[in-house]
Image (tube, coloured by chain):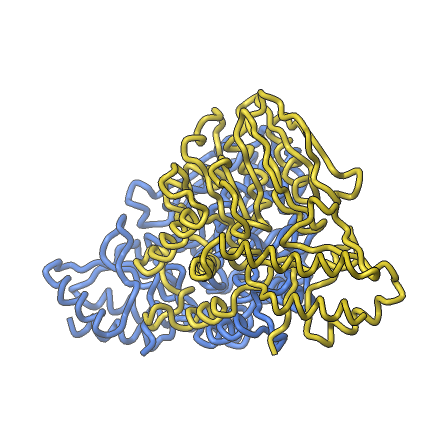
Chain colours: A blue, B yellow
Amino acid sequence: MKKHNFSAGPCILSQEVLEKASKAVVNFNNLDLSLIEISHRSADFVAVMDNATDLVLELLNLKGKGYSALFLQGGASLEFLMVPYNLMKEGGKAAYTDTGAWSSKALKEAKLLGEVDVVASSKDKNYNYIPKGYTIPTDADYFHCTSNNTIYGTQMKKFPKTDGLLVCDMSSDIFSRQLDFSQFDLIYAGAQKNMGPAGATLVVVKDEILGKTGRTIPSMLDYQIHSSKDSMFNTPPVFAVYVSMLTLEWLKEQGGISAIEKLNIAKAALLYNEIDRNPLFEGSAAEEDRSDMNVTFLLTDETKKDTFDKMWKEAGISGINGHRSVGGYRASIYNAMPIESVQVLVDLMKKL
Amino acid sequence: MKKHNFSAGPCILSQEVLEKASKAVVNFNNLDLSLIEISHRSADFVAVMDNATDLVLELLNLKGKGYSALFLQGGASLEFLMVPYNLMKEGGKAAYTDTGAWSSKALKEAKLLGEVDVVASSKDKNYNYIPKGYTIPTDADYFHCTSNNTIYGTQMKKFPKTDGLLVCDMSSDIFSRQLDFSQFDLIYAGAQKNMGPAGATLVVVKDEILGKTGRTIPSMLDYQIHSSKDSMFNTPPVFAVYVSMLTLEWLKEQGGISAIEKLNIAKAALLYNEIDRNPLFEGSAAEEDRSDMNVTFLLTDETKKDTFDKMWKEAGISGINGHRSVGGYRASIYNAMPIESVQVLVDLMKKL
């Protein structure tokens, strides 16, 4: 029996995608070769990369709007460094919001390259809300935010206007909801939530913003180099790119972002409704900032913990323990999570 | 019928490894979950990482000798930057040999951080030999070399003594031959030749050499950070690490490096003997520097090209075209290549 996988990331992927990926590892495209033992310059793999980047722009409704989609390595953590290298002018500055562990790490790396203005932080309440009403300095080269905070279960519902560039780490909610993606100048995301397996990083960047800082950028950190080589400056993470392509194809078959968003809203509502209805549970994030991807909640009566933990384990649920810095539970209900699995969890909560 | 896969990289892996990897993508360790949808902090994956790093040190005979093995991302190309960041002192310098496209790229990145002394180059003869008899400045922080040059089919047989640190890019011949690996202070290698699929990079580093440059190193480029987190500073490339572990287990079962080296020597001898015997072919690398991994050769009579190309294609051989900068043919005969496949190629050469 397949588990109900609520892991925060790496996380659940479509079963159909996993089966196709498994097959490709022994025989890809009926080449009598594995996907992972062919040249990345072969026509078969170049088609994978082209298809993956094309699907990204199509699904985000950014085709023909001057954006490039890049598949890189190093996760969002390397982007924390690449963003300031590519966008912060020599002697310039950047504005960041601090909404959790990941944005803190992002701004730490940016400080190595210049001035960082932390315009808002929710650290005062263990990051359980999204700051609002802050002012972005007009002379900031860019403003950086994290759209969804996996650990704390918060999500930005609106994005500010800024005179500079708008940069967003969407690692944990990209492809999950409809947004005007053209408001962003650069979006990045580790693959391992809604896009694919760990080992690939997606960068979607407006071409015209690059090459304007006056900095000498090391080759592997330079978006323009990766873009000019169609993400093949060096050997790409072949398997991770392929599984990302399969996942994007699967998403398109589901009806794209508009269709999956409806399902995501329904899944989140099902779970939050039970959390709010049931006196044994309480949500840990501010209501208006609740994430539709990561639902964090606590028991109001800790004596029920052993019983509840036994119940969900017996029901085949996995990956639901909260992060150590928040405690309690975290149900990550990414795109590939069926509503039936959420219902299994809600039924247990009702029974507790 | 499985192809005879002579690709330069990504390249042939053991069929047994591919089958295990394929299975893990649908159900890993009988968890009823895919390898790529579980947390990298789960006991099952932590065991994979521990086993992989342990096997690296065991196979290289470096256990208990003060080395760490790290699994990172970004390929050798990111190491070109990380090596000087971690080993070149502020205001210091490094010595490099230029033995091909990859070492040229390596020294280009190092120049961004300080003085680079190119102590020898074989560029004068399109890199068809390994320079010898050069002097390494006594004040160089480190000396960097590339042990095997995939494109040109050359391989270093001996490594120089140096007063500074000895650093080697072994991307294309690590785990293929017995060396005193303790002569190196830092070894790095993209996984996609003898270790696994593209998407993981191995770094083997002597712990005591780190943290001595006086530089502020960005987190993702800092070996000490990766080492202190057992290669889990951020989400590792789970699949690539797992397949690397399987490949290292497979190598150990074959008898380790000493056993595979014998086979590699036999495969290379079989092919080079035919190249030297057959007047229709000639090797493109200097004889004493010939690689046991990548055998580069040319037709002496170009009118035979169409016939030969037709013959090997019909025989199920793939990936044998030479790199554009050398021309002719390149048979990459990495660890997982059976001698039977080399014999198929040699038989065709005899028949031409």
Relative to residue B115, is residue A85 depicted above or below?
Answer: below
Check the picture and name the quadrant holding the N terminus of chain A. bottom left
Q: In which quarter of the image is residue A6?
A: bottom left
In this picture, residue A123 sits left or right of residue B237: left
Q: Where is residue A259 in the image (x, y as percent from the top left)?
A: 49, 73
Q: Which of A95 and B339 is in front in this view?
A: B339
Inspect this view and state whether residue A135 appears. Answer: no
* Residue in the picture at 84% in, 66% down: B305
Q: Where is residue A68 in the image (x, y as percent from the top left)?
A: 64, 55
Taking the view exactly as shown, the residue that stands out farthest to the right is: B303
Relative to residue A343, is residue B327 depicted above or below?
Answer: above
Q: Which of B282 and A163 is in front in this view?
A: B282
Q: Nearer the viewer, residue B207 or A131?
A: B207
* Residue in the picture at 37% in, 57% down: B48
Q: Where is residue A2 in the image (x, y as percent from the top left)?
A: 34, 76
In this picture, residue A64 sits left or right of residue A168: right
Q: Which of B105 and B322 is in front in this view?
A: B322
Inspect this view and state whether residue B190 appears. Answer: yes
Check the picture and name the quadrant holding the C terminus of chain A. bottom left
Relative to residue B179, is residue B319 depicted above or below?
Answer: below
Q: Where is residue A343 in the image (x, y as percent from the top left)?
A: 29, 75
Taking the view exactly as shown, the residue that stands out farthest to the left is: A303
